[in-house]
Image (spheres, rainbow, N blue to C red):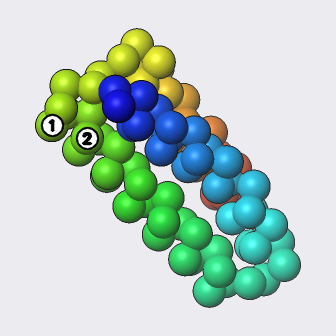
Amino acid sequence: MRHIPNIISAIRILLVVPIAMALRDERLALAILLFGAAAVSDALDGYLARRFGWQSELGAYWIPSRTSCCSRRLLSR
């Protein structure tokens, strides 16, 4: 169970590609929906990690790297 926040984070990282493709294809509603799902998942994994003490070294590393990766990719459009 303690790996659930990391699994959620991995799924969020994978969402970068479909979000970028939706933006490329000018499917803005889909891009907004996927971005919203990513934002909710960010809040959820953080809550779960703090609430149940499921913090990990991997999670601590992923927080700055995934934010940087996702932001750069999406804002480069």
Image disc number at residue 51: 1
Left or right: residue 64 versus residue 46 is right
**Which class describes the residues within 10 Å of circle 1: few (<14), some (14-19), or many (20+)?**
few
Q: Which quarter of the image is occupied by the N terminus?
A: top left
> Is there CB contact under 8 Å for labels 2 and 1?
yes
Position of 6 relative to 14 (above/below): above
User: Does the rendering let one see residue 63?
Assistant: no
Q: Position of residue 48 (x, y in %)?
A: 25, 41
**Which class describes the residues within 10 Å of circle 2: few (<14), some (14-19), or many (20+)?**
some
Q: Which residue type carries mark 1?
A: Arg
Res 28 → quadrant: bottom right
Q: Which quarter of the image is occupied by the C terminus?
A: bottom right
Left or right: residue 29 versus residue 9 is right
Residue position for label 2: 48
Q: Nearer the viewer, residue 23 or 12?
A: 12
- Residue at image point 74% right, 73% down: 23
Left or right: residue 51 versus residue 33 is left
Q: Which residue type carries mark 2?
A: Leu
